[in-house]
Amino acid sequence: MPQIKVWTRQHKSVLDKVMNDGRYIAKRDYIYMDLQEHANLVLEVYDWLVKNGPDAVNKPADVTYPVWVSFDEDATMLSGDNGVVFELTIAQEMITPINIAKWGAILNYSYIPINEADKERHRELLEAYGIDDVKAFMTQFYPAIKKEIISSWDRLFDENVKLGNDLKYGTIWEIRKEWVTKVIQ
C-alpha cells in the first residue's frame, strides 16, 4: 500500500489522547465544544457525510465522525495556543478525498449541479418559488426541493461533476500514534 504524508490541525488535548491512548477519534461532544452554537448546523451535514461517504462501510464501530486532513502542510495553520498540527504517514487508501468547493456547497446547504444546464434548471426552480437553497433546506415547506438538494450531495464523490476547482481535503476515521511522524506546536 502506498503511504503518503497528510496533516491535521487539532486541539492540543488531542496530542495527549494520541500519546497516552494510542488513538484519537472525533466525537459529537468534541464538535460541540469546538463549534458551540453552530454545531447543530454543521452536524446535520456531517451526519450525511458519515452515512453516505464511500468509506462508510470501513468506519470502526466506535467512531462517530471523521478527522479532516490536508494534503498540503501549509493549509494547516496553527490556531493560537491551543492548536497542534500532526504530520501523519498513512496508507493512501485510508483517506477519502473531499473536494473543497463541493464540501463548501454542502456546508451551505446548496445544490450541487451535474452541469451548467442542471444548474440553470435548479436556479429557475428556486426562482419560481421565490426562495434559495438555504430556505428550501431549513424550512419544512419545500420537502421535494430539500430532497433534491440532499440527493445532489452524492456528487461530492463523483469526479466527473465539477464545481469550482479540484482542490481537496481528506477524511480519515482516526489518528493512530504509529502514524504520527511529527507534531508541530
Image (cartoon, helix red, strand yellow):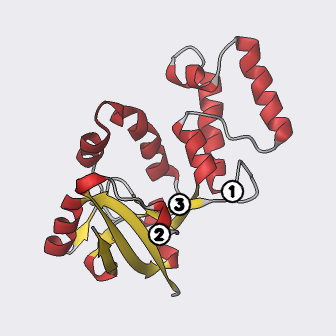
Choose the circle earlier in sequence order: 1 or 3.
1
Give the amino acid type for the residue marked by disc 3 in the picture. Tyr
**Residue farthest along the bottom direction in this orientation:** 1
Give the amino acid type for the residue marked by disc 1 in the picture. Asp
Answer with left or right where residue 156 lies relative to residue 185.
right
Q: Which residue is the site of mark 2?
A: 73
- Give the numbered dot on residue 86: none
Q: Secondary structure at mark 1?
A: loop
Residue 140: image location, x then y, percent: 51, 17
Q: Quadrant of residue 20?
A: bottom left
In the image, what residue occupies the spot 27% across and 67% down?
A: 185
Is 43 rendered above or below residue 85?
above
Q: Quadrant of residue 168?
A: bottom right
Q: CA distance from mark 1 to mark 3?
A: 15 Å
In terms of depth relative to the viewer, which is nearer, 5 or 131?
A: 5
- Give the numbered dot on residue 158: 1
Is 46 rendered above or below residue 63?
above
In the image, what residue occupies the spot 71% across and 60% down?
A: 159
